[in-house]
Image: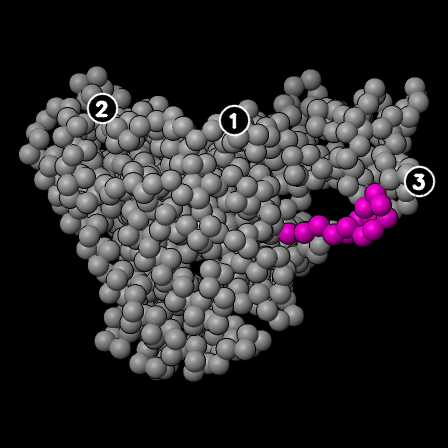
Amino acid sequence: MRNHVKTNGLTVAEELFAFVRDEALPGTGIGEDAFWAGAAGLIAEFSPQVSELLDIRERLQEQIDEFHRSAGAGPVDPEAYEEFIRSIGYLVEEPGDFTIETDRVDREIATVSGPQLVVPLLNARFATNAANARWGSLYDALYGTDVIDEAEGRKRTGGYNAVRGAAVVARGRAFLDEHAPLAGALHADVTAYRIDGGELVAVTASGAAGLADAAQLVGYRGSPAEPEAVLLVHHGLHVEIQINRTHPIGAADAAGVKDLLLESAVTTIMDLEDSVAAIDAEDKVVGYRNWLQLMQGTLTAEVGKDGRTSTRRLNPDRVYTAPDGCELSLPGRSLLLIRHVGHLMTSDAVLDPAGNSVPEEILDALFTGLGSVHDLRGPHAGGNSRTGSVYIVKPKMHGPREVAVACNLLAGAESVLGLDPLTLKIGIMDEERRTSANLKACIWEARDRVVFINTGFLDRTGDEIHTSMLAGPMVRKAAMRSTSWIAAYEDANVDIGLECGFRGRAQIGKGMWAAPDNLADMLDQKIAHPLAGANCAWVPSPTAATLHAIHYHQVDVDARQAGLGVSRRSTLRQLLSIPVGDPASWDAEARRNELDNNIQGTLGYVVRWVNAGVGCSKVPDIDGTALMEDRATCRISSQHVSNWLLHGVITEEQVEDSLRRMAAVVDEQNASDLDYLPMSPGFDTEAFFAARELVLEGAVRPSGYTEPVLHRRRADQKNTDRLARSAT
């Protein structure tokens, strides 16, 4: 640590100490010494508990490894396996029936179903765009993506293509006819909209028509006779018909409609975990500052386009006139959640009295909690949560005891920050095998503050591979999605959530759409998530959020959840089935292709992480298709190679050869980046070494996590870059 401050027995990085003193504490009513004294107490109390949890993980994994060694080759006896993991405490007794007790939950989490964005908090532009993605242009989302094909003159040209535009307008009118139909008319035939007697009147050549359900009109803006906006609601989500006859689009529209604005990213997770590369105090302060300014409503980002720079700010609330003439205000921004790190990592941004790095999750609880105080009291109160709650997503927890410690840590942070008990809510990422196998017990431990369970199928797959590393060679990666355990996992997350009373109280979520440029496929496939009973699912961009919002108009998730009832569609035995493959059926070419695919994906992600500090980005796969990659996808790819290497499906020589060949491929894919540091032909960069370490030593990495290797290599690269700058 280069510069630091001593306080209450702690050694604190100077930039973090200054941030707390000068930016985060003012306006909270919390004294500086009281804050750091509370921080010291929290660190002293919870550091040993976190260390013990990690020891338990290691001990359980060693016992499971020994079970598979003793069992030898061949299929695992499911009955003997279940009995064994129960005997060692990996499985716990499931609690009886109960209903979660969480209160003060915002409607965006409790009752409104819709898309959920996940964005790296260290990028202010991404964070601002995501917060503003509560409302999205349907016309822009259709026009600018592959949802509208480019046949018959509908190409996305440099200028405006009127043929493509007409197709967009037609899709928009079809959307209105399906989800806000008129009585006896079509929206395509409307020549004007007006408000008369508190009801919507749509004028057509055949006469006037109203909404089939008059209650769908909830507001308007402008004069009743010539409104500039008409606000409708369907399944709890709002749709704004924007009218402007002087706008280029509106001027060509019979009704003057220039756009349809959809309520889109109802909630957004600001991420300090898998999508960021935050390895030191310098990085963490960027994230903490962005969160603080989001809570204050002051975050801005400079955006450059066509040689011009503009400042992007957070949107204000949207104001309308209700049908009864009263003012109606709706949030202009997404309700924000914050994802902390898990139990594994420590940070030298703060050292304990013995000089040890402290658990990073304690810092996240303290400093994002401190930022959130500005949303709870003072001049900025209510800009995010209208109920006075803070929503924390907690990843990578293994089982109910780890959930209990996480909840106790949040209670301790509440005490330090002077918050009412149960202000800091928790979202449980159901992404580790021991959590999904004990999900009801995990929810029980958080029953008075839980607001969210979400299937993180990417990390869950990585943990599936690592936990059962010695059971045998895993199926090929593409086949993993059709194995019985993953279907049981996805169903159980919904079923257990409903069983525990989540309907109308908390979110049941599904995972990310990982191909951000293939949104026609997303529109075709991601409807499966609300159909499954999930009231939110992750999307990679504001545009994707607007398109995914269509699914929540097509599916009444509340009714779907009611129809699912409380019976479980899967069994624990199915959930615990191990996806061991049949290497005899894979020829040399299949093995080589699988290896190259995994190695290329690992290198493509790691090189940006280590060299540029980019934690999540669109990375071309081996065929050039852009995929969203983060540490979870890297965990799968690297663990899969480690598993096949361990069981002799591939050799170390083949892995080394693939690393070198795929490094050249990744270098070529990044050739247009002037700041890119190539890995070939020297194969001696920190990024190359990091990828090599992940795949060759993955079997012995804690839970197969990539963070320790990436953090260490990124720190070395930052130090090298710092020395190079000093030399020049």
Q: Considering only vertical position in the picture, is 620 above or below 127? A: above
Q: Residue at x 91, y 37 (%)?
A: 196
Q: Are marks 2 and 3 in contact (CB under 8 Å)?
A: no
| Badge 2 amino acid | Gly
If the image is split into quadrants, where does the C terminus sit? Answer: bottom left
Range of residues picked out in magenta: 319-333
Q: Position of residue 563 (x, y in %)?
A: 52, 26
Q: Would residue 85 appear left or right of 554 to someone viewing this image?
A: left
Residue 563, numbered circle: 1
Q: Position of residue 707 (x, y in %)?
A: 31, 52
Q: Considering only vertical position in the picture, is 682 above or below 191? A: below
Residue topped by disc 2: 581
> Could you tell which of marks 3 and 1 lies nearer the N-terminus?
3
Q: Position of residue 283 (x, y in %)?
A: 42, 63
> Closer to the camera: disc 2 or disc 3?
3
Q: Would residue 459 appear left or right of 290 to someone viewing this image?
A: left
> Could you tell which of marks 2 and 3 lies nearer the N-terminus?
3
In the rendered view, how is the structure colored?
one colour
Dot 2: within a 10 Å radius of its alpha carbon, few (fewer than 14), some, or many (20 or more) residues?
A: some
| Badge 3 amino acid | Ala
Dot 3: within a 10 Å radius of its alpha carbon, few (fewer than 14), some, or many (20 or more) residues?
A: few
Label 3 residue SS = loop
Residue topped by disc 3: 225
Q: Nearer the viewer, residue 265 or 505?
A: 505
> Could you tell which of marks 2 and 1 lies nearer the N-terminus?
1
Q: Residue at x 35, y 51 (%)?
A: 445
Label 2 residue SS = loop
Alpha carbon distance from label 2 to label 3:
67 Å
Q: Position of residue 713 (x, y in %)?
A: 29, 56
Q: Considering only vertical position in the picture, is 685 above or below 549? A: below
